[in-house]
Each structure stands twice: as structure tokens, then as C-alpha cells.
Image (cartoon, rainbow, N blue to C red):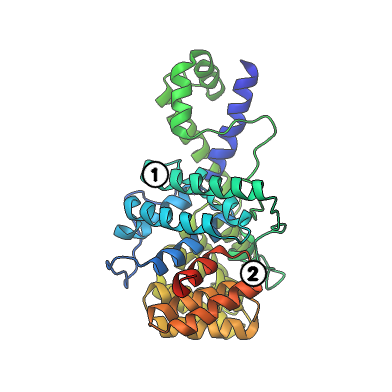
């Protein structure tokens, strides 16, 4: 019994430690893009959005961040059409002869995270099952080509929000302490209902008189929230670097609004802090505030025209506003700085498809695959457009 308690307590510490980056935001509010459209998503749209989602997973997005991603899509984030598209995508991925171990790992990790909330549970189940099928196929074929981390190398010595704020996912889920147990909150509640001894132990650990499962979970939420607030209030930053670093920590915890406020303070001290403008734009884009994000990326690019990630992310924001030509221009600029940046070749081709410039899109997808042969999203679009 003591071993079971220890494993669950380790899981609780890690889970709530990551989860409480979300607590500072109102659960009733949701950012929406001024350019958000309710037109149905095309397969190109789904694959573009899915590529962004998998990149986030590769850089350590937690359960709440996955939920926020779908919430920010509004009607476009509803489970039923996403599941239908995932099933179509899975069929193409399974039929592909290209090695897809990286894709399988990311989809399985996405599936694990998305199943933590009812709103995304069905999407998570579908993604996990498809990832597992791809993984099994790769195991049977003996293809183990994917070996390295996913993240691009950082563009400067200063931590970058998009490239360093999250732990990189290789080919396995983020690890828990050895001997720990992985649960969802719902599963924890069920375990406490079934195991009165465990409930009493947790109640004693938390110092509460009741062993009611819901009261235990509420107490966990309150205690970890209080600890998070205490940690954040222990020291008030003074320098631009301290404010910048605080913003990075808040972003790691999922508190993007808090991170933006901290980077604003850093930029008040030093308006020429290119990394601050870049990170601010990244957070605003993640929150769906695309026009504001573009303004921040413009400042970052003015200060550092070689920041290919800022060009790329500005392109993403313009794409989400359906400003296809502007997005393509940004990705062209990114590729001038980093010609081997295969994600920009893929993104550029997605916008070209929206403009009906199919032959150019095909050439871009081929270029992406030339650089990264295991890039399944590009392979899928190429097969769709060439019918082979």
C-alpha cells in the first residue's frame, strides 16, 4: 500500500506542478482572432493546424495547452470533424512506405495528453490509436530511422520561447520519476473511490479531515495553487534579464498572459531586446491574438532580420488571418536566412494551395521532403495532389 501511495504522490507532484501554470487565467474567457472565419476547414487547413499541434507536443505542451489549442479554434476545434480527418490522415500514413516513427511518437504523446479532458478525449483516443498502429507497423518493418531531437537549434544564446521553453520530445513520452504512476484526474478520483486506505493517506498528507475524493482533489488544487503563487511572489525582478527569465518560466507553466506582462516589463527597460519582442509575439500568436503578434514580430525582425523563426511565426499568424500572400512573403524571408528550414517549405506550400497555385505547392512539398524525408505531413499532401 505504501508503494502505491508513493507512486501516486509522485505523479500528483509532477502533474499539478505542470498544470498550475494555467490557474491564473479565467476559465470563462477565450481569446479569438479578429480574422477568425467559420468556413469549414479543408484537408490542407487540418494538416497545417495539425503540424503546428505536433510541433507544440514535441516542445513539451501539457494537457491544458492542448485543450487551449482546440478551444481557440472555436467551432473549428469540434471533435467530430477532427476525428473524421484524423481517420483519413491515418489511412494515408499507414499506406505510406516512408519511415514514420517520429510521427507515431508525437501522435501517441498527443493522444495521452488530449485524453485528460472530456472536450478533447475523443480526439486523443483517435490520435493515440493511429499513432500506435503506425508505431507497430514501424516496429514490424524494422525501420528505426528517426534518432534525433525535433527542435531547431536556437538562434541566439538567450533562451527562445519557441525553441527552448519546452523540453524536446524525442521518441518517448516525458518521463516521470522511476516507479511513479500515470493517471488522469478522473482516474485519480476513481482510484480514491475504490481505495479508502489510499484516500486516508492522501488526506493525512494534505492535512485535511475528510477522505472524500472530490475534497482531496480540491485540496490538491488549492495547495499547489498557493505554492505556485508563493513561488512567483518571492522575488520581484529588477533587470530586463530577470523580467525576461520570469516570462520564460511563466510560459513554461502555461501562463502566457503572465509571460506577456513580464516581457512587457523587460521591453520597458530595453525596447531593443529582440528576444523579448519575438517571445511576446509567440505568446500572442499562441493565444490567437494574431494582429498583436504580427506587430511584435515586426519589431523583432526590425531588430534582427536574421531571425528566421520570427519570419516563420509571422507567416503563421498571417496564414491564420487568411492573408496568404503576406504569409508566403514571410516564409520566403525565412528561407532566405535558413534554406533547409523544411517546416517553412511546408507552410509556404499550404498557403500556395489556398491560392490555387498547385504546381508551386507540389514543388514546395517536394523540397520539404528532400530536406526531411520522414516529414509525413508533406508526404501526405504531395500524394493527395499528385494522386500517387
Q: Residue 372 has which mark?
A: 2
Q: Quadrant of the N terminus?
A: top right
User: Is residue 33 visible in this depiction of the protein?
Assistant: yes
- Viewer-nearest residue: 157 or 68: 68
Q: Nearer the viewer, mark 2 or mark 1?
A: 2
Residue 40 position in % (x across, y down): 29, 65
The reply to whether dot 2 and dot 1 touch (C-beta < 8 Å) is no
Q: Residue at x 64, y 54 (%)?
A: 167
Picture layout, residue 383 above or below residue 144: below
Secondary structure of the residue carrying numbered label 1 = helix
Does residue 356 appear left or right of residue 270 in this picture?
A: left
Q: Residue 372: image x %, image y %?
A: 64, 69
Q: Where residue 37 appears, x then y in whole percent? A: 29, 69
| Residue highlighted by disc 1 | 122
Image quadrant where residue 239 sits: bottom right
Query: Which comes sooner in the sequence, label 2 or label 1?
Result: 1
Seen at 56% across and 41% down, the residue is 17
Amino acid at each position: 500500500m505504501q508503494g502505491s501511495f508513493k507512486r501516486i504522490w509522485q505523479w500528483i507532484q509532477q502533474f499539478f506542478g505542470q498544470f498550475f501554470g494555467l490557474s491564473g487565467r479565467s476559465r470563462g474567457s477565450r481569446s479569438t482572432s479578429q480574422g477568425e472565419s467559420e468556413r469549414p476547414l479543408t484537408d490542407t487547413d487540418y494538416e497545417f493546424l495539425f503540424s503546428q499541434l505536433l510541433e507544440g507536443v514535441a516542445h513539451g505542451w501539457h494537457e491544458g495547452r492542448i485543450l487551449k489549442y482546440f478551444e481557440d479554434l472555436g467551432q473549428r476545434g469540434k471533435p467530430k470533424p477532427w476525428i473524421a480527418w484524423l481517420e483519413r490522415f491515418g489511412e494515408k500514413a499507414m499506406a505510406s512506405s516512408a519511415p514514420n516513427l517520429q510521427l507515431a511518437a508525437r501522435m501517441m504523446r498527443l493522444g495521452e495528453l488530449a485524453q485528460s479532458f472530456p472536450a478533447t478525449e475523443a480526439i486523443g483516443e483517435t490520435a493515440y490509436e493511429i499513432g500506435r498502429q503506425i508505431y507497430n507497423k514501424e516496429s514490424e518493418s524494422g525501420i528505426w530511422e528517426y534518432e534525433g531531437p525535433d527542435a531547431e537549434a536556437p538562434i541566439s544564446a538567450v533562451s527562445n520561447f519557441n525553441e527552448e521553453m519546452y523540453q524536446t520530445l524525442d521518441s518517448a513520452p516525458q518521463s516521470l520519476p522511476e516507479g511513479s504512476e500515470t493517471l488522469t484526474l478522473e482516474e485519480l478520483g476513481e482510484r480514491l473511490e475504490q481505495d479508502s486506505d489510499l484516500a486516508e493517506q492522501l488526506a493525512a498528507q494534505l492535512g485535511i479531515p475528510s477522505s472524500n475524493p472530490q475534497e482531496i482533489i480540491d485540496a490538491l488544487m488549492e495547495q499547489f495553487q498557493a505554492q505556485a503563487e508563493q513561488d512567483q511572489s518571492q522575488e520581484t525582478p529588477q533587470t530586463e534579464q530577470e523580467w525576461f527569465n520570469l516570462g520564460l518560466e511563466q510560459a513554461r507553466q502555461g501562463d502566457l498572459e503572465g509571460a506577456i506582462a513580464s516581457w512587457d516589463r523587460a521591453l520597458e527597460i530595453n525596447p531593443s531586446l529582440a528576444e523579448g519582442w519575438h517571445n511576446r509575439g509567440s505568446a500572442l500568436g499562441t493565444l490567437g491574438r494574431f494582429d498583436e503578434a504580427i506587430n511584435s514580430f515586426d519589431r523583432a525582425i526590425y531588430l534582427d532580420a536574421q531571425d528566421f523563426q520570427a519570419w516563420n511565426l509571422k507567416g503563421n499568424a498571417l496564414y491564420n488571418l487568411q492573408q496568404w500572400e503576406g504569409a508566403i512573403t514571410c516564409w520566403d524571408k525565412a528561407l532566405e536566412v535558413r534554406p533547409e528550414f523544411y517546416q517553412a517549405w511546408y507552410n509556404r506550400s499550404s498557403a500556395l494551395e489556398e491560392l490555387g497555385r498547385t504546381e508551386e505547392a507540389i514543388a514546395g512539398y517536394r523540397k520539404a521532403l528532400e530536406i526531411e524525408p520522414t516529414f509525413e505531413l508533406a508526404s501526405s499532401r504531395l500524394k493527395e495532389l499528385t494522386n500517387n
